[in-house]
Every structure is written in structure tokens, then in C-alpha cells.
Amino acid sequence: MNEPIIQANESLIRNGDFEQGFSRWKKGEENKSWLSRAREFHEHAFITLLKSGNKSSVSQSLEVPKDPSEQARYVLSFWCETRHTEAGKLKISIDGQQETLEILLPPGASRDVEEDQARLRSGQPLEFNPIKYRVELALPFSAGDTLTVEVSSPANASNDPISGICIT
């Protein structure tokens, strides 16, 4: 039998836009109630994104279909806005190996809390102002290996019910 053809620019992450809720994603054990989805406005369109706060996390495992090579590179692209004073993390690990790739998600520009609250009170969505990431997966993995992608937010102060990570 022929091997399946891997399409260029095909996403191995399923439901990365969170349009299907948390389908395909595993919620971490800590603070699951801090995980949610939101629809926000970005570049003249509504998009769905994950909101993760107060040390909550989600992860997804995927199988590598083909050995990395000049013809098969693996790149992770995503948009993230960190609405927190501390950085969040996106971590990629290989099952059975210790080496990981950690991408820090630094705090974004300060938001106008009063403006955000006014938008929400009037029924308007928040404006999503992400950093656009594109990271080559420089890890020692091979075809058949299982990679796990995990997004986690930093801890919130006890009087902070709002801060977190917004990602899609």
C-alpha cells in the first residue's frame, strides 16, 4: 500500500480554533473551571479562542506522520494574547523523552480595563490583540512519535478573576 500523502500546511492539531469546544483537548487537573472559550473581534471578524487562567491548562497529543526532513518540516503557528502580568507557556514534549520545547507567552500591552468592562456591559465583544507566533519544532522526534502540546497560564492573585491567556 502507498503511504498517505501529507499535505503542506496541514494542521496536525485538531480543533486548534476551539470551534468544537474542548473536543480533542484534555483539560489539566488544576483549576478546570478557569478554562473557557470566547468569541472576540480580530481584524474585522469574530474568532473563537481558548481562555485559560489561574494555572489551568489544556493539552493535545498527536502522532508525527513523517520524519522531519528538508521536505517535511514541522512548524507551530498560533495567535496568543497574554492578559496577565506574568508569562504563560506553550510546551511541546515527545512521549518517552525528556527534551521539551517551551515557548514563553509574554504579557501583552496593558489593556484598558474600563474600556473592556464598558464593551462587555454594552454587549460588545472584546478586541483580541494577539502576538502571531510561528515556531519551527526543533526537537528530536521521528515518524510515529507522539508529541504533546500543552498551553498553561500563570497563577492569578487571589483578587484577580480576569487575568489569563487567550490563544487560538
Image: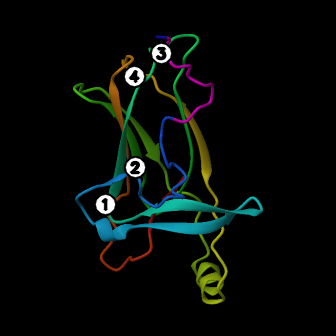
Q: Position of residue 17 (x, y in %)?
A: 55, 52
Circle 2 is placed at which residue position?
24
The residue lying at 55 percent from left, 22 percent from top is 6
Can residue 165 be seen?
A: no
Instruction: Write down the region rendered in magenta.
Output: 2-11
The residue lying at 33 percent from left, 29 percent from top is 146
Circle 1 is placed at which residue position?
55
Q: Are marks 2 and 1 in contact (CB under 8 Å)?
A: no
Circle 4 is placed at which residue position?
139
Q: CA distance from mark 2 to mark 1?
A: 20 Å
Note whether 107 is above or below 60 in the view shown: below
Q: CA distance from mark 2 to mark 4?
A: 23 Å
Q: Is residue 28 left or right of residue 1?
A: left
For the residues carrying marks 2 and 4, which lies nearer the camera in this image?
2
Q: Is residue 68 left or right of residue 150?
A: right
* Earlier residue among tags 2 and 1: 2
User: Please, which residue is most extreme toward the bottom here?
Assistant: 121
**Residue type, numbered disc 1:** Lys
Q: Secondary structure at mark 1?
A: loop
